[in-house]
Image: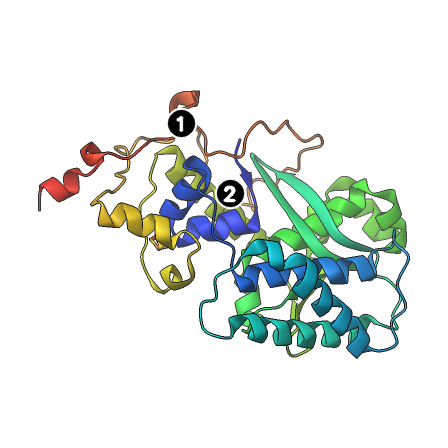
Amino acid sequence: MIKWSATKLKDATECMFKIYLKYEEKIKSKENYALASGKHVHSFCEKFNDHRLKRNNYESAESFAKQGAYMWNNLVLPPKNLEEKFEGEKWATYNIMKNCLTNFYEFYGDREKPLDVERRFVLGIEDYLIEGYIDIIDKPFKHIDLKTGYHLPTEQELKNDYQFTIYAAAIPFLAQRDQRLREMFQLTKAQEKTLDNNPLELMEEVTGEFYHMRSGTFVPIKKTKNDLLELLNTIESVSHRAEQGDFTHHRGRHCDWCLYGDKCNEYRNNDQIILPEPIREKKSKGLLFDIHNNPLKLHSELPQIKSIRTPAKGGKKKKPKKLTKKDTPLFNDL
Ligand code: SF4
């Protein structure tokens, strides 16, 4: 069984060759300033908001931001040896980080801690397991995602983002299993009853927020059960491609920021390409989900996860395929 996540699904819908490099060849992506600093900001803010930890007292948003940036510069950054993409990226990152942390503290500094932070979940729906972490869970029935990136998305862009569909489904699922969260959400009797019967029925009552840390702006997110159906059908479709060994390249603008670009170009420069297996019929019926005829089923108990690799064809495990000149018949025909 493939364990899916928002990142894996995004990768798969963008380019299946990225999935091949990441999960079959197990190529490690190159860390960069944006990724590493984003992780540090998340972890620093998480500690401040974690209900299990004692909060440090900061005099002001500025002192909170200075402390976070100091830790980055002196503890986190030195062992990483990151390469600058442009001259001065190190200092630009430092300033962006301070700005994000200042905005965060101005909003959260005097507030009560949220219900939970960096909360892991593994959601089992139909034949799929979807895992992830929610940055912040709060009242009433809300998830908040912290982002340090440049782009401030519109509500429509967030509506199109599978990550938040997964979170909207995960919140009631967590509430069903975590007594503490369940109590703190202060659900109505009707909601409690629905939660016991089928938590997915409550996903449309979940609210979400995208917190754009650079500008201190919250953008609201709403998801419906139809969004979840689209998500499951997309997972079904990309799983089918993986089962068929279809790891076709999909080149485009997204290649500009692909973390596997170097490796991908190495294959390209060696005239190597992966060709999909001949198309086979999918054995199971009902390739796509249709909520009107069949209500979605949640797993009551989660099955064991053995591997996060794409499944081997014919049920057998296969060794990662090393590309050779034989894998490049397209080029022979040119
Ligand atoms: S560089 Fe482009 S084609 Fe290559 S793996 Fe990345 S997204 Fe796919």
Residue identified by numbered label 1: 283
Label 1: few (<14), some (14–19) or many (≥20) C-alpha neighbours in 10 Å: few
- Whether 292 is drawn above or below 95: the answer is above
Residue at point 53%, 46% (across, down) = 232
Q: Earlier in the sequence, mark 1 or mark 2?
A: 1
The answer to which quarter of the image holds residue 76 is bottom right
Mark 1 residue CB less than 8 A from any atom of ligand 1: no
Under circle 2, the secondary element is: loop
Under circle 1, the secondary element is: loop
Residue 103 in view in this figure? yes
Residue identified by numbered label 2: 289
The answer to which quarter of the image holds residue 271 is top left
The front one of 246 and 288 is 246
Residue at point 84%, 49% (across, down) = 181
Q: Is residue 200 left or right of residue 60?
A: left
Residue 47 location, x and y as percent? 80, 57
Which amino acid lies under the numbered mark 2 shown in the image of this protein?
Answer: Phe
- Whether 184 is drawn above or below 240: the answer is below
The front one of 18 and 239 is 18
Residue at point 76%, 40% (across, down) = 197
- Whether 333 is drawn above or below 87: the answer is above
- Scheme of image coloration: rainbow
Quote the CA–CA distance across marks 1 and 2: 16 Å
Q: Is residue 212 left or right of residue 18?
A: right
Residue 152 in view in this figure? no
Which amino acid lies under the numbered mark 1 shown in the image of this protein?
Answer: Lys
Q: Is residue 215 left or right of residue 112?
A: left
- Whether 37 is drawn above or below 324: the answer is below
Residue at point 47%, 45% (across, down) = 28
Say the numbered circle drawn on residue 253: none
Residue 236 location, x and y as percent? 47, 41
Residue 153 location, x and y as percent? 56, 72
